[in-house]
Image (cartoon, rainbow, N blue to C red):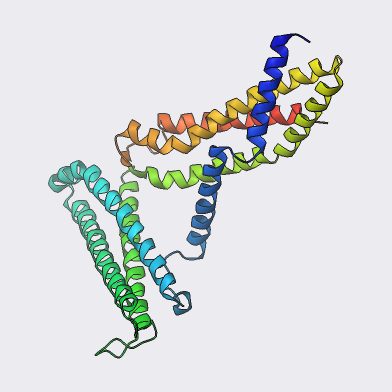
Amino acid sequence: MNFHFKKSLLLGLLFFHISCSGSNPLSDLLGSISSKVASSKVAQKVGKYLPTSSREFGDIYAMESQVRNHREWVQDKAKELKATKKILRPLLNKSLQNDFKFYEFVDANLDIMAAAHKNILSNAKTEKKLIIRVQKSRRLEIESKIPGKEKTFRQQFITLDNAIIERKLSYEESLSKIGKALERRDIELVFITKQKDDWLFISQGLFDRRMTLQPKIVDLTSEVVNAVAESGNYIEIIGIRLNKVDRLNRKLDQLDKFFVVIDKIAEKEKGGRVYLRNNPEKKEEYELRFDKSVEAYETHLEDLTMLLLD
């Protein structure tokens, strides 16, 4: 066996050791993303913004977690609202002259969204103050009555939280109304952050399919190790097979990395996270690139599956 073949074989073994050891940082990243995607999909189906039951706030830590959720929502929606206003402004300025009814409708719903956002921020801050008040006192707990009030700290927290949930519903409802008003004029209001959820769902499904092949890759690696120990012509045959699998895995790695940053690519292409599409049937360059990448990934998975057949 020549030196160069042995060298490439050892590199191949090293690659598979890293891939199968669970230390692949991309695998860890996609794994963490998948749990968020799955939970968000379920939340949408069961009613993400329904009033929260008091049983969910059994301790101060549950309350703190809820406030963190609200803070993340406020931060994300602040960017969304700002971007939406910016992208709609030229259209609204034009509508002010020739379609005042449309202008008035969209502008009113933007005001509702802004008011809801402001109210949610205010109530979330009040929730945080309640938590801090309990944490700083040795005598108070969440079931204690608020001095001078009839409600306990937990009851007041729930009241505030239900108000936040209602405001979130109001925000999303107004955004939906704006989207439908634009659709009636053959214009689509596109949110790249919302597209990202769909992209992650698709890319995670592909990645999961790839992971189902890992046991066979481990078996192939073991087979190569045994062949090296035994020597003979068989090592060259299985070595060629190993190198083909290696090349396919590298291609899949590149596509996995692309899927992770597709939203950044889209935002750069469109100049922001929100944009108007005048032809809803036409796909943008980043969307076409994503579709082609999905097709390529599926082809590579099929080829990899064939190589790993017993």
Observer able to see residue 35: yes
Q: In the rendered view, tell whether residue 200 sits above or below residue 76.
A: above
Which residue does the image show at 44% across and 44% down from the upper left?
196
Q: Residue furthest left?
A: 97
Number of numbered discs: 0
220 displayed left or right of 64: right
Which residue does the image show at 39% across and 33% down from the upper left?
265
* Residue 119 falls in image quadrant: bottom left
Q: In the rendered view, tell whether residue 245 sits above or below residue 182.
A: above
Observer able to see residue 213: no
Q: In the rendered view, tell whether residue 219 sits above or below residue 92.
A: above
Q: Residue furthest top?
A: 2
21 displayed left or right of 109: right
73 displayed left or right of 247: left
- The quadrant of the picture occupied by the N terminus is top right
In percent of width and height, residue 10 lies at 69, 21
* Residue 54 falls in image quadrant: bottom left
Which residue does the image show at 33% across and 74% down from the upper left?
131
In percent of width and height, residue 144 lies at 36, 87
In percent of width and height, residue 179 lies at 33, 51
- The quadrant of the picture occupied by the C terminus is top right
Question: Foreground: 193 or 279?
Answer: 193
Question: Foreground: 184 or 197?
Answer: 197
Question: Foreground: 125 or 203?
Answer: 125
* Residue 15 falls in image quadrant: top right
